[in-house]
Amino acid sequence: MGIRPDIHPTIEFRSAWEANFARVLNKLRIKWAYEPQRFFLSNSMSYLPDFRLDSPNPWKVKWIEIKGIWNYGDKAKLRYFMTKHPNEKLKVIARKEYMRLAKKYKDTIPEWESAAKKNKEKKANMKKVENNRSETKNLGKIPSPHGRAMIDAELPLTKTKLIAEKVKKNGRTNNNK
């Protein structure tokens, strides 16, 4: 979720798939709008398609719904939309078609978001955390700031030395009065 500056400075996409689809539309020079219109299907139900395509496109439709995960009631809502608005042409891009698009465009769109890229970033971040942990010393159990419970503590080595000196001097930490 979030803003992707390479696509638009203010649009918040709900998923990487939607953001990647917008990138494909931009690459194909198809004019589009993200979630521009809500359709009220009944007093208690509405539907907000992901994209409105405002120029000729390979799908020959006006509305696109990107569906990575099907939640309860999604299929019924889409059927109801198509029944209630038969003149509104809607195309659902589910996993199989999205994967075809990904295969075709992921190497030609530099900002393409993929699970593999995310996993690589996650591993790099985990490595940073591990490196930071090697620069800390485990103090074991110490009193919590409120003195009610014991907590596990890790502090940077430089602070560890200062606290160890205070403990030797006073026999306690500031939090254990």
Image (tube, rainbow, N blue to C red):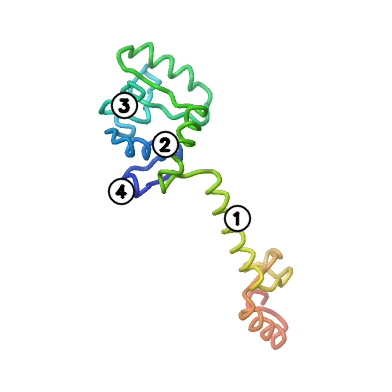
Which residue is depicted at the point 38% across and 47% down?
Answer: 4
Q: Secondary structure at mark 3?
A: loop
Residue closer to the observer: 163 or 113: 113
Quarter of the view holding residue 137: bottom right
Q: Three-letter amino acid code at disc 1?
A: Lys
Going from N to C along the chain, the mark reached first, 1 or 4, is: 4
Residue 36 in the image, given as x and y percentages of width and height:
29, 31
Question: How packed is label 2: few (under 14 Cα within 10 Å), some, or many (20 or more)?
Answer: many
Q: Considering the numbered disc 2 on the image, is that residue within a helix, a strand or a loop?
A: helix
Between discs 2 and 1, the one toward the N terminus: 2
Residue marked by disc 3: 57
Q: Earlier in the sequence, mark 2 or mark 3?
A: 2
Whether residue 171 is situated above or below residue 8 in the rendered picture = below
Circle 4 residue: 9
Residue topped by disc 2: 18
In the rendered image, the quadrant that contains the C terminus is bottom right
The residue under label 1 is: 123
